Amino acid sequence: MLGKDFQLFAFLSRRSQGEHRNVLRNVLTVILLSVVLPLVAQISKPVVIAHRGASGYLPEHTVEAKVLAFEMGADFLEQDLVLTKDDVPVVMHDIHLETISDVAQRFPDRKQSDGHYYALDFTLSEIQQLRVNERINPATGKAVYAKRFPVGRASFQIPTLEEELQLIEGLNKTRGRVVGIYPEIKQPGWHRQQGRDISRIVLAILRRHGYTTKQNLCWVQCFEVDELKRIRFELGWEGRLVLLLGSGRRNSDGSGAGPWFTAAELAELAKFADGIGPALGAVVFGTSKADRKVTDLVKNAHAAKLVVHPYTLRSDELPKWADSMDDAQQLLFNEAGIDGLFTDVPDLTVRWLSAHGKR
């Protein structure tokens, strides 16, 4: 009798194990469908990165510019980050303040010997007193882009990284769609020379807001190769990383490119980064539409399994090789095969991608 009971128990145990495996398989399938596949879709389709927000319409990196870019359908909102005197990351493109604020009028005695007003010399409370304006040439006081938001109109401020992340989290909730972030750590080497570890500070804030792995919609970008390696290996960042490239070096075919342009260099980069952010001139070069040429950068990057997000397409400052936004976007997305684009006018890129079945 005991033998039969043992056999029945063994049979039921085997059946239970099989059912457990089926349940586990079903759970993994649900996870794949609900988490992984949407992420793959987000990565595989061309993405629109709002360069400093909708900066073609409102002063760059203001909260207002980010909200407008969100409503225009951008997939990612960019945050350029520098530190204040009290180690708070604020969202602004340069390490100095005079080109985008009235700092020279409010704090005339805080200028350094090189003529710059550095954010690192001001506390957050002082920076919050500044009035942000459309980017100007300090020598002339005139706007860099004459047709953009009038200088001196309305009231804008410099936000902190914390404030912007909270804003995006709130919009994602109330608007029912998930828009990612694209923070750039500005001049980390310079910050370390001043005794500040901006990368460590920024990564701690990102982690606190739930940006921890490559499953999160966050790309951390930087121009400095050594710092990108440090972020990955020393600081243990497990999320996505992008190396930003200039267009200074020339390839054998005459095309402009930055370091890591060759296939071998890109393969080496892929050991610690997930993508590159080259200048437009590294993807397409030429002085006119007649002599333009697509470089092999995107092809080589894709062979190394790196995504390519070039910067920056502007409707009021088109590349010399394009005669319109549509022309530039057709060349970049269809012929060059880029994976995403930094743009000051995200609505125009969203519209073009939608019209061509890429969204």
Image (tube, helix red, strand yellow):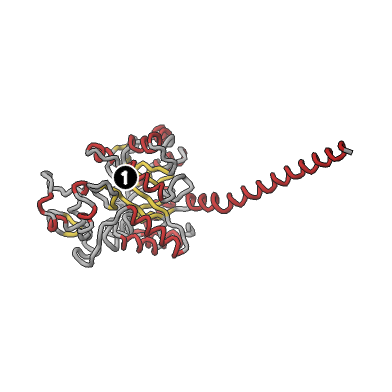
> At 42% from the left edge and 52% from the top edge, which residue is drawn?
333
Residue 354 located left or right of residue 129 = right
**Residue that extends furthest to the front in the rendered view of this protein:** 2
Compare residues 357 and 122 and report the one nearer the observer: 122
Instruction: Please tell me how crowded label 1 is: few (under 14), some (14-19), or many (20+) other residues with Cα within 10 Å.
Output: many
Frontmost residue, 112 versus 278: 112
Q: Count how many numbered circles sit on residues in the image.
A: 1
Left/right placement of residue 10 relative to residue 292 reads right
Residue 86: x and y, percent? 24, 47
Q: Quadrant of residue 238?
A: top left
Residue 150, x across and y down, in percent: 21, 65
Q: Is residue 158 visible?
A: yes
Is residue 246 left or right of 40 when viewed as pictured? Answer: left
* Residue 339 percent across, percent down from the top left: 43, 49
Residue appearing at x 49%, y 47% in the figure:
215
At label 1, the amino acid type is: Ile
User: What's the residue at 85%, 40% (across, down)?
Assistant: 5
Between 322 and 104, the residue placed more toward the observer is 104
Which residue sits furthest bottom? 154
x 44%, y 64%: residue: 175
As drawn, the residue found furthest toward the right would be 1
Numbered disc 1: secondary structure: strand
Which percent across, then down, holds residue 289?
Answer: 32, 52
Q: Quadrant of residue 257?
A: top left
User: In the displayed structure, does residue 124 sit left or right of residue 305?
Assistant: left
Q: Which residue is mark 1?
A: 185
The quarter of the rendered structure image containing the N terminus is top right
Q: Is residue 254 visible?
A: no
